Image (tube, helix red, strand yellow):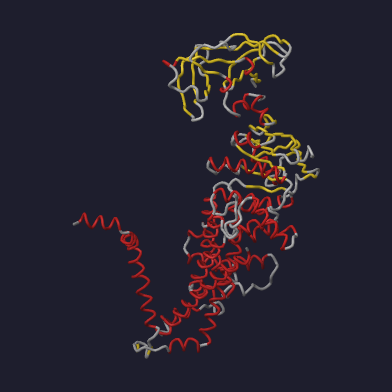
């Protein structure tokens, strides 16, 4: 009997796949699917009083969201900040990865490890250290004032959108490095030489060969940065002030001190859908763009 | 025809302490099929890359058709390269790969269309325009690489071991095709290979390289018949080496004492004048005769067959004689390993077939 089961198992690829996937499947079900379902269902309820919730189905919370200018503008701001963070990260990480992939001959791994060195400390500590750098009496302001270049400290550095963008960019750069590096490192250097041999300048070669071939890495980096930064609330809470607040801070408030769980859940769902739409648009347009280039 | 179409003048290329190319000077003729032959690490690929512009020489000058191209980047040189791994752009199809190099030549759309069509016909790839590199066989990729380079009508086509990745049958076919193609279009080919048979069968002239230097540069025939040193003789085909010292000179001949065999009067192909210099004698396996009975050739040695290897069209024998530890000889068809009783055999050598090499 056991023998029969064993041979049946050995012959069945789906059975093998499921047994390998099951630990992850269980974890995903418990830690993702269940909370998501809960959140989704809460978004269709109504908060009656501080402790009471009406469990009858309504889509009023979604209507509420779009009727509150604050929430809509926070959503737009969240997307905007994440977009800038993603762009700045790409523009700074890409050249670094390009250099390591094509010009570093020995110890490439060491370079990558060194680049991720700042990320060995906790995220929270790094956010706090930016406070020290950007603050009114921080490293930048005091040194500029001591050098006599400024009389008043720069106030836009701290508790602002700028502070959030700088901090998030630094916090997520390492995650962009890896997909970019892998996609660039995979490019056969003789393809680049071939393009040069066929009459293209360095810049043209980059546009026609290197960039299109590294596109999978670029898309990967965009998604890896964009998705978590849209929902980040630690950095805006600590460094954003009123100006740098994002939608996630509001969602946190709805689930906390404001205590309007259904509206919080609806806001979170809307954010989720927004991220999904942006993700699809980004992947689609980059693919189209690359076809246009080549 | 311009005899000094490509002039390589005292070119050196050092990578750190390694002298990849070490003070090399020679000229390549216009319309010639020229091969750079040597073992891996001999500097042949570096020399080709210097011609293409992917590397710049540490010292020396490169002239192409009278113009100094030493400092020109690859996109400004009238050369094109067929890469060892073909380097077909994976994200665009065959047609776009071939068109790729035409963008910057300022041609009209009709001209581009015609050139691409013609070159694809030339390399027999009509009907493959829409395919991608991943949908092609090794031989087809090789043709795409060739078409892509030729469509620009370069003055010189550089080929970096383009046949290395093909199986033997296809390689033999492509050798003939490349040779025919080159004669047809008349473009100068500089061909890098480590395969001596390939170099010999295709080229007008071959430069044998070792340790960054040119060991010998001549026609394939001359290279085989008259190698100038032990390296070339050993690298081109198989041969037997015997140590010897020279005695007195007699016109075109010289008396040579070959170790263990005695004194013989042989052709002085090195034109050695002085007495008692140490030389090496080279005897090609196919010039010797192996037989069951004694012959009346100049030298006839009795020996014992230690090993045979059957190669189809011929059999190779490894023979030990009283005088010489190991002689390699071949016999076509007539004898095989069953022909000899108790492995006893006779090896015969003609003095004309012994050539002298500097010991170096």
Task: Decide: is B223 above or below A22.
Answer: above
* Image location of residue A288, percent across then percent down: 58, 69
Q: Give the residue at the far right of this rendering.
A: B66
* Quadrant assignment for the N terminus of chain B: top right
A104 vs B37, nearest the viewer: B37
Residue at 49 percent across and 65 percent down: it is: A125
| Number of numbered callouts drawn | 0
Q: Quadrant of residue A185?
A: bottom right
* Image location of residue A105, percent across then percent down: 58, 47
Task: Decide: is B198 above or below A197.
Answer: above
Question: In screen coordinates, is A112 left or right of A1?
Answer: right
Task: Decide: is B300 above or below B94.
Answer: above
* Image location of residue A242, percent across then percent down: 54, 80
* Image location of residue B82, percent across then percent down: 64, 47
B201 vs A8, nearest the viewer: B201
* Quadrant assignment for the C terminus of chain B: top right
Q: Give the residue at the far bottom of this rendering.
A: A48
Residue at 47 percent across and 26 percent down: it is: B309
Q: Give the residue at the far front of this rendering.
A: B334
Question: In screen coordinates, is B59 left or right of A173?
Answer: right
B132 vs A35, nearest the viewer: B132
Question: In screen coordinates, is B343 left or right of B66?
Answer: left
């Amino acid at each position: 009997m056991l023998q029969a089961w064993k041979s049946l198992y050995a012959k069945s690829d789906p059975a093998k796949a499921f047994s390998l996937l099951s630990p992850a499947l269980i974890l995903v079900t418990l830690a993702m699917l269940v909370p998501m379902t809960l959140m989704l269902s809460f978004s269709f309820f109504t908060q009656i009083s501080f402790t009471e919730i009406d469990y009858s189905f309504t889509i009023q919370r979604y209507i509420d969201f779009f009727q509150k200018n604050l929430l809509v503008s926070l959503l737009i701001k969240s997307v905007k900040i994440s977009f800038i963070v993603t762009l700045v990260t790409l523009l700074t990480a890409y050249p670094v990865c390009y250099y390591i992939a094509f010009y570093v001959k020995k110890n490439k791994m060491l370079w990558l490890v060194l680049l991720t060195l700042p990320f060995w400390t906790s995220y929270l500590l790094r956010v706090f250290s930016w406070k020290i750098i950007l603050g009114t009496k921080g490293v930048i302001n005091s040194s500029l004032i001591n050098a006599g270049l400024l009389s008043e400290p720069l106030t836009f550095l701290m508790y602002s959108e700028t502070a959030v963008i700088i901090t998030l960019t630094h916090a997520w750069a390492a995650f962009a490095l890896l997909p970019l590096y892998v996609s660039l490192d995979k490019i056969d250097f003789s393809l680049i030489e071939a393009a040069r041999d066929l009459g293209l300048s360095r810049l043209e070669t980059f546009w026609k060969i290197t960039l299109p071939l590294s596109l999978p890495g670029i898309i990967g980096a965009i998604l890896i940065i964009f998705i978590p930064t849209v929902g980040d609330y630690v950095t805006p809470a600590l460094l954003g002030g009123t100006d740098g607040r994002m939608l996630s801070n509001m969602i946190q408030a709805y689930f906390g001190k404001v205590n309007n769980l259904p509206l919080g859940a609806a806001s979170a769902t809307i954010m989720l859908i927004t991220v999904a739409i942006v993700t699809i648009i980004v992947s689609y347009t980059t693919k189209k763009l690359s076809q246009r280039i080549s | 025809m311009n005899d000094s179409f490509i002039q390589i003048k005292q070119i050196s290329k050092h990578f750190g302490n390694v002298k990849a190319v070490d003070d090399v000077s020679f000229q390549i003729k216009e319309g010639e099929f020229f091969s750079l032959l040597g073992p891996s690490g001999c500097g042949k690929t570096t020399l080709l890359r210097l011609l293409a512009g992917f590397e710049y020489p540490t010292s020396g000058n490169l002239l192409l058709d009278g113009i100094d191209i030493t400092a020109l980047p690859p996109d400004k040189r009238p050369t094109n390269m067929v890469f060892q791994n073909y380097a077909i752009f994976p994200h665009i199809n065959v047609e776009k790969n071939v068109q790729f190099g035409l963008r910057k030549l300022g041609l009209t759309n009709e001209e581009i269309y015609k050139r691409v069509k013609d070159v694809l016909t030339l390399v027999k790839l009509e009907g493959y325009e829409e395919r991608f590199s991943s949908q092609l066989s090794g031989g087809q990729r090789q043709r795409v690489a060739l078409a892509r380079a030729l469509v620009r009508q370069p003055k010189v086509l550089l080929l970096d071991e383009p046949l290395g990745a093909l199986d033997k049958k296809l390689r033999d076919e492509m050798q003939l095709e490349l040779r025919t193609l080159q004669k047809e279009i008349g473009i100068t080919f500089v061909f890098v290979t480590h395969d001596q048979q390939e170099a010999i069968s295709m080229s007008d002239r071959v430069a044998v390289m070792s340790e960054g230097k040119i060991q010998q540069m001549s026609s394939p025939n001359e290279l085989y018949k008259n190698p100038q040193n032990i390296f070339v003789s050993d690298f081109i085909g198989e041969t037997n080496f015997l140590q010897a010292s020279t005695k007195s000179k007699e016109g075109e001949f010289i008396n040579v004492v070959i170790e263990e065999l005695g004194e013989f009067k042989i052709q002085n192909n090195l034109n050695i004048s002085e007495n008692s210099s140490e030389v090496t004698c080279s005897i090609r396996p196919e010039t010797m005769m192996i037989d069951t009975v004694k012959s009346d050739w100049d030298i006839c040695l009795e020996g014992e067959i230690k090993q045979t290897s059957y190669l189809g069209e011929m059999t190779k024998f490894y023979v030990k004689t009283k005088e010489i530890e190991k002689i390699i000889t071949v016999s076509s068809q007539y004898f095989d390993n069953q022909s000899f009783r108790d492995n006893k055999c006779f090896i015969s050598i003609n003095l004309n077939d012994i050539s002298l090499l500097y010991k170096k």
